Image: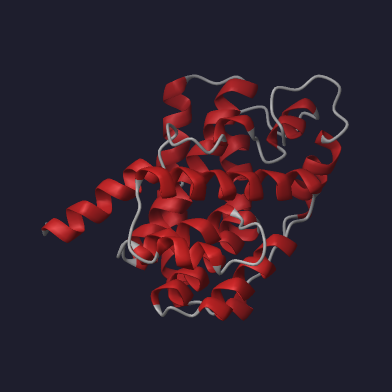
Amino acid sequence: MTDPEAAALYRLMAWLSPSYPVGGYSYSHGLEWAVEEGLVRTASDLEDFVAAALAFGSGWGDAVLLAAAWRAAAAGDDAGLAAVAELGAALRGAAELALESTQQGQAFLKATLAAWPAPGLAARIAALNAPPVLPVAVGCVAAVHGVPLGPALAAYLQSFAASLVSAGVRLVPLGQSAGQAVIAALEGRVLALTRRAAAAKLEDIAFASPVIDWCAMRHETQTTRLYRS
């Protein structure tokens, strides 16, 4: 492994770890209502929920947004980057899902500007004309820091899946070993999505997870809850 490759890996591990101060632990992506409603009761149910979110919901959509933001930022295309940010802010099926991604995106940029400054990063962030959703923020930062697109996509999607599994472990509840088994089972899906998203164009974006959107909408009025989405 070359020094640049090691540096890219180090940064991705830092930026997309649960300890990075974006507040990801406070969101369940509608999973809390799915558990309340009895849709997710077992590790197998949790795997199905996360797999659907990856393939048809925010996982795929976020991956396409991340790739588009990465390309625009790498090319210094401020107008293109702003257009991706605007589209990303509009493509959420429920209010809480929009809150989940925009608040994490803003927190990600704030933390990164403070701890991981880089030449040109502030200028790229200033070009955004809408509160950036998390994948746009990650794609922009990764490009400016010289982190390759493929690893950035794989790390983002793994982090997305792991965050949902962590919520499921608490909510169902499940044991930690069961949660890790779910993450392991999702590896092939994450890698396949990484390959697809790396070759995708912005017009390939799609969100088609109505049950997850419905869970997020019902969560808005859930009486007792631990999570913000």
Provide residue 220's location: percent of width, then percent of height: 84, 36
Q: Nearer the viewer, residue 118 or 67?
A: 118
Residue at the (56%, 69%) spot, across then down: 127
Q: Nearer the viewer, residue 146 or 198?
A: 146
x, y percentage for residue 105? Answer: 57, 50
| Residue 43 x, y percent position in the rendering | 56, 31
Which x, y percent locates residue 93? 78, 55
Question: Would you say residue 89 is visible in this rendering?
Answer: yes
Q: Which residue is pictured at 46% across the width and 47% down the height? A: 186
Q: Nearer the viewer, residue 162 or 9?
A: 9
Q: Quadrant of the C terminus?
A: top right
In the displayed structure image, the side of residue 204 where residue 197 appears, left or right = left
- Given residues 185 and 19, the one toward you in this image is 19
Residue 172 in view, yes or no: no
Q: Describe the colour scheme in one phrase.
A: secondary structure
Q: Quadrant of residue 84?
A: bottom right
Q: Residue furthest left?
A: 2
Q: Residue at x 57, y 61 (%)?
A: 60
Is residue 91 toward the left or the right of residue 180 in the image?
A: right
Residue 37 shown left or right of residue 163 in the figure = right
